[in-house]
Image (spheres, helix red, strand yellow):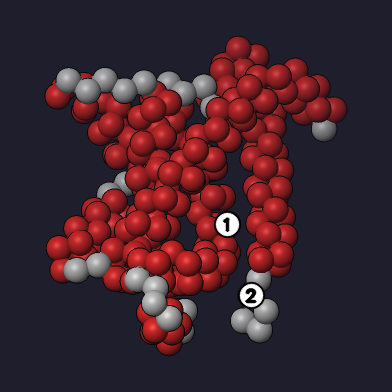
Amino acid sequence: MAEFIKVFFQAFPFLMSGLKFTMELAIISIIFGLGIGMLISTLRVYGGRISYTFSTAYVEIIRGTPLLVQLFIFYFSFPQIGIHLSPIVASIISFSLNSGAYQAEYIRGAIQSVEGGQMKAALSVGMTKWQSIRLVIMPQALRKVIPSWTNEFVYLVKYTSLAYLVGVPELTAQGEFVASRNFEFMNVFSGVAVVYLFVILAITWFFSSLEKKVKIPGV
């Protein structure tokens, strides 16, 4: 234990530097993913045949292929068609698109759980279809989707470790950097695991508190 503590504090500055990239990737990607998810879920529930087909194809393609393959396509394959992306940009795009597909399904389920009569009531008082979705349906759906959104954020924080493979100096990459120099692989990566654990616990606590705060009374 004493050796672990010693190595952990030696590696701590590097791990915190990597954690900064990890959290930036996760936060930016979850926000963009939320925007994508809201759009795609709305098209799947309320869109016409073309928009439904497009949105469904997007969800199935993204969910049906590994995230690592998607990341490699953006970083390694796009330069062959003249599009050069930095490691961070390629990571954010791939993580956002991947998260958006999963969030779309979470939000779609939440939308469909809202009582159908509320849409009719909104239309009856003069709202347009899209005003009804934006002002009546979506606020309720987003409250209901918080538990699923929490899981998605937790997964995304852990999946950011894949960015190490394209050169992003995130938490896992910094752990490997330190361990390759002091050869304390057990202690260093145990420290990396501890950092991830505390971050995940903090995220879970935050969203649990948020869920209680915005919970719809009687639901």
Above or below, 73 relative to 49: above
Look at label 2 and name its amino acid: Ile
Above or below: residue 156 compared with residue 5: below
Percent coordinates x, y for residue 49 in the rendering: 16, 68
Measure the C-alpha gap from mark 2 to mark 1. 18 Å
Few, some or many residues within 10 Å of mark 1 (<14, 14–19, 20+): some
Residue lying at the far right of the rendered structure: 2
Residue at point 57%, 67% (across, down): 143
Q: Which mark is residue 76?
A: none
In the visual, does 157 lie left or right of 207?
A: left
Give coordinates of residue 170: x percent, y percent.
54, 27
Q: Which mark is residue 150?
A: 1
Q: Quadrant of residue 126?
A: bottom left
Which secondary structure, mark 1? Answer: helix
What is the count of numbered marks?
2
Q: Which residue is mark 2?
A: 216
Earlier residue among tags 2 and 1? 1
Q: Nearer the viewer, mark 2 or mark 1?
A: 2
Using residue 132 as the reference point, say whether residue 45 is left or right of it: left
Q: Name which residue type carries label 1.
A: Thr
User: Is residue 134 found left or right of 3 in the rendered image?
Assistant: left
